[in-house]
Image (spheres, rainbow, N blue to C red):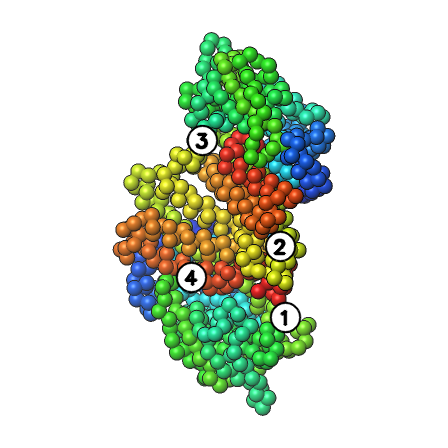
Amino acid sequence: MISFDMTEEQKMIVEAVSKFALEEMREVARECDEAGEIPKELIDTAWEFELVASHIPEEYDGFGEHSALTGLLTAEELAYGDLSIAMHALAPGLVAFPILEAGTEEQKAKYLPLFCDVAFKPATAALIEPRYDFDPNELTTTAALDGDEFALNGEKCYVPLAANADLLLVWAAENGATQGFIVPRGVPGLEIGGREKNMGIKALATYELRLNDCRVPKANKLGGEAGCDFSRILNHSRVALAALAVGVARGAYEYAREYAKERHAFGEPIASRQAIAFMLAEMAIEVDAARLMAWEAAWKLDRGQEATKECYLAKTYADDMALTVTDRAVQVLGGHGYIRDHPVEMWLRNGRGFATFDGMAMV
Amino acid sequence: MIDFEAPNVIKRNVEMLKMTAENMMRPVARQYDENEHEKPWDYINMVWEFQKMSGGFGGYRKPKKDKPKDEKKEKRPPIGYMMLVHVIEMMSWGDAGIYLCTPDPGLAGTAVQAVGTPEQKERFLTRFTEGEPKWGAMAITEADAGSDTAAIKCRATLDPETNEWVLNGEKIFVTSGLMAAQESDGILVVWATVDPSAGRAGIKSFVVERGTPGMTVTKVEDKLGIRASDTATIVFEDCRIPYENILGSPEVHDPTKTKGFKGVMQTFDASRPAVAASAIGVGRAALEFVKAELEKNGVEIPYGRPRHKLTAVQHDVLAMEAQLKAAWLLTLRAVWMADIKMHNPAQASMCKAKAGEAVTWITQKAVELMGPLGYSRKLLLEKWMRDAKINDIFEGTGQINKLIVARRILDFRSAQLR
């Protein structure tokens, strides 16, 4: 039955997160962007929604079943509030979900309960490398088996929360294929670099890091000897980022729409002029279209179907959509869109990032 | 719950229609494109047998008196429009022009179903369940009134002595107008004003049956595409129809009695996604052709490569796929709402605006990418580009549909956004 109705449970959680987004996240988003940091209490409150634990089965101390689709719904609301805060709050999923999807029994039993705790578990993953033609399937970071250990070498960037993470999942090429390696904090050879300065997501602490003959036990390879199906994990990341993009864009579109109804020029609201009205109509259409593409992709993932095409198309569509919609939002606000008194310039800076963000969120 | 699995009954229908498309439409597609004023009778006669039984696109069934209500049927989820768009998409994938030749009550039927009395439904629609192939058509547009439907001048005057409406005016661009008004025992639903001074409030719909004196088909257009479909000019000159042929109430100034006009307008919320679906079928045909041709020549379309590792052609094809999918999902969303009777004018216009634009771009891109193959009349690709274009024009241009979307999202009346 083709249907677009959320379940009652989904509606409840979406409503709750949406309220948090509007009442708490939006209140501090600008401050956080200017200051480059997020108050701990806000992250703790977000953690209370149990957005990771609700996807982890009971046997690992969670209370739910993994659903990428449900994850999308809440990710969109978080990003609707603020992208930096959303990505910070969701960062632990970058370790939890790959382990859930592809970890060995031992790895699941050892690590998953850590994400079901009352306190926020700082964890993150390192995927992106500092090259313009970065390809998650052709990493330059390498992992070489040496006896009972893997030796990791390479450079990563855009690693959220690296300086405070207890656990990092480092993606590296082993025999040409991308595999994951669990690297606990403090392991020799893991050199966390300086805090990065980015165009957007300024409240999100991201770092460069270098792996300099960083050694981890064999058992820390995600999925054990067999490794993992990276394409599936990348798909989970693609839909997550698509959902975040939809959230950011939706916020920008709504803000521009409301502004256009209030702002008067030539004797009437600018929304009464087709040039502006058509922009807004197109923004509305594109936000909805991108959302539906992400939903379809996540739905397939949840059913265990091959979904690389859908996930890839959803992500790339959302990347373009996020830029177009946030750009249009600035345009609708004109000069006022250019100043930091309004959030749209921040949303444009954030929105442009999606074409770069790879593996920085997961559902 | 959110779900993208089409029900089995839809899948089965679509499979069957694919065979119809491949066997009955594609082989003659070029022939009916080159010979614009010929009709595909083999297709028409074959599909009519099915239409009579199935109730056509509008699902009209002769009401069965004394038949007990089928409880199970009542409880099944309504999938009328969902089925319709899947059917139309596949038929248009076959051939959009030939699909439009399908003998069906069409928009005339949907108008009668939406606001007709039981007596009117029986009088006008029963014919579509029996006998020879028949067509219904909706006549709205005039030479000076297309997007601005409120400006139509076709007049309906009541003759109190004979209790007949007298229609005078000229309609253009009537899809299946020739077949409905002249070549079959069909019906037209004609928009006319009973009171020009009342603007929109004066516009009513009237049913005119074939053979009514005073109704004449004066022209059949030569078109860019969908050439198999007849697009007619129909003149009404003192055309007299029974009083009972008006759909809804003739009241002009009583706002509680505008159900007729509103009812017909609401049918657009269902017909717009249908047009989107037709566009998407053509777009899919073009896209599949391009991919197949590329594959034959060793060019694969990878899903997962970063932008820098894609050739320009691969990037274009991926964009075409994404645009088509976006349009299709918006269409599914709109008809899901229609089937569960959720008010959906914004969503109906969204999918129509998106599909019209996207498929225009996709089919034009396909011709571009295929170079000499795309431009040649030896293949159907150039025809699909010509066929696709109409979808951003009829049933409300892309601009009008965007205007509707804009008004809805802004909560503006038409006076606030023109």
Foreground residue, A274 or B148? Answer: A274
Marks 4 and 1, how far apart in space? 30 Å
Marks 1 and 2, how far apart in space? 33 Å
User: Dot 1: what SS?
Assistant: helix
Of marks 4 and 2, the one in the foreground:
2
Amino acid type, mark 2: Ala
Question: Same chain, marks 1 and 2?
Answer: no
User: The numbered mark 3 sits on a residue in which chain?
Assistant: A
Q: Position of residue A27 (x, y in %)?
A: 71, 39
Question: Same chain, marks 3 and 2?
Answer: yes
Q: Is residue B136 above or below residue A149?
A: below
Q: Which residue is mark 2?
A: A260
Foreground residue, A162 or B82? Answer: A162
Q: Earlier in the sequence, mark 4 or mark 1?
A: 1
Amino acid type, mark 4: Ile
Q: Which residue is mark 3?
A: A132
Q: Position of residue A217 (x, y in %)?
A: 53, 12
Q: Which residue is mark 1?
A: B259
Q: Residues within 10 Å of mark 3 (few under 14, many from 20)?
A: few
Given contact means CB atoms under 8 Å apart, are the residues at marks 3 and 1 in contact?
no
Of marks 3 and 1, the one in the foreground:
3
**Residue displayed at 49% across by 9% down:** A148
**Residue displayed at 51% across by 79% down:** B154
Q: Residues within 10 Å of mark 1 (few under 14, many from 20)?
A: some
Q: Residues within 10 Å of mark 4 (few under 14, many from 20)?
A: some
Q: Position of residue B258 (x, y in %)?
A: 64, 72
Marks 3 and 1, how far apart in space? 60 Å
Marks 3 and 2, how far apart in space? 37 Å
Foreground residue, B8 or B271? Answer: B271
**Residue displayed at 52% across by 43% down:** A323
Marks 4 and 2, how far apart in space? 32 Å
